[in-house]
Image: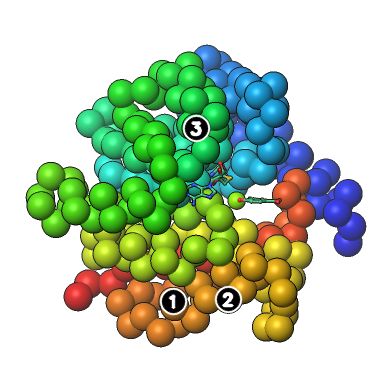
Amino acid sequence: MSQRQWIAVDEYFTGALIDTDTDGDTDTDNALHAALAASDAAGLPAIAVSPAQGKLLNLLASLINARHILEIGTLAGYSAIWLARALPPDGRLITLESELRHAEVARTNIAKAGLADLVEVRLGPALDTLPQLEQERSSGRAQPFDLVFIDADKEHNADYFAAGVRLTRPGGLIIVDNVVRGGAVLDAGSDNSTVQGTRRLIDTISADPSVSATAIQTVGVKGYDGFVMALVKAP
Ligand code: SAH
Ligand code: DHB
Ligand code: MG
């Protein structure tokens, strides 16, 4: 099994099931393609979730009737658009981004997708903006999240996950991207900080009785990688 085959199969399913989605009208589907084109044109890295992964996030948000979604790591807003499209008209997605340029490109893409009223891009390192969200939550100014998607710097994934648990309602879902990285996650002695960050994340989850989690390996246009998915249990 080769990377070429993974890509061909991913593109087959994407062409058949996603680009032709009869639920989405042409304008909104163009918005997803336009977001990637604008991201490339602005020189942002091509590391957004794949179309099939974006659709999965969209379906999961729909399945749990998510009304409040948190994303950590916006980039150009591609995954945010997929997630926000699952929201009802009075829903809200807050997405955290540390790079001004990324946040600007994302805000433009999100507005062009017709989602500006549902999505807030918050600028700043997530280690600063997450405590703000926790304050808003504990003072009753903000609702708990139904779904959290963690996809920023992997070094802080354990901290992001812990904050995500505190900010998520019982029955809510936390998803973390890029936990496999070609199998590198297996290397306990790795000097790669992202591998160590992922392994700290897994240790954190495994020691947390308030969540029930799994990990799913994936192949496709983004190579060999995977997601962690965790259900926040009732207290
Ligand atoms: N979720 C996006 C991809 C995110 S790429 C998508 O699939 O479309 C990771 C993003 O996290 C980058 O834009 C990067 O600037 C941002 N990031 C990195 N470190 C961060 C931090 N400490 N706080 C917030 N965002 C961060
Ligand atoms: C890469 C991919 C990602 O999905 C991400 O969030 C960060 C980096 C990468 O392929 O380098
Ligand atoms: Mg990612």
For label 3, the residue is 100
* Distance CA(mark 2)–CA(mark 3): 29 Å
Q: Position of residue 47 (x, y in %)?
A: 67, 43
Mark 1 or 3, nearer chain start: 3
Depth check, mark 2 against mark 3: the one in front is 3
Q: Position of residue 12 (x, y in %)?
A: 76, 40
| 112 to 225, vertically: above or below | above
Residue shown at 27%/28% (left/top)?
Answer: 89
| 77 to 124, vertically: above or below | above
For label 2, the residue is 199
Q: Residue furthest left?
A: 140
Residue 56 visible to the viewer: yes
Residue shown at 41%/37% (left/top)?
Answer: 123
Q: Which image quarter is the N terminus in?
A: bottom right
Q: Secondary structure at mark 3?
A: helix
Residue type, numbered disc 1? Ile
Depth check, mark 2 against mark 1: the one in front is 2
Residue type, numbered disc 2? Arg
Mark 2 or 3, nearer chain start: 3
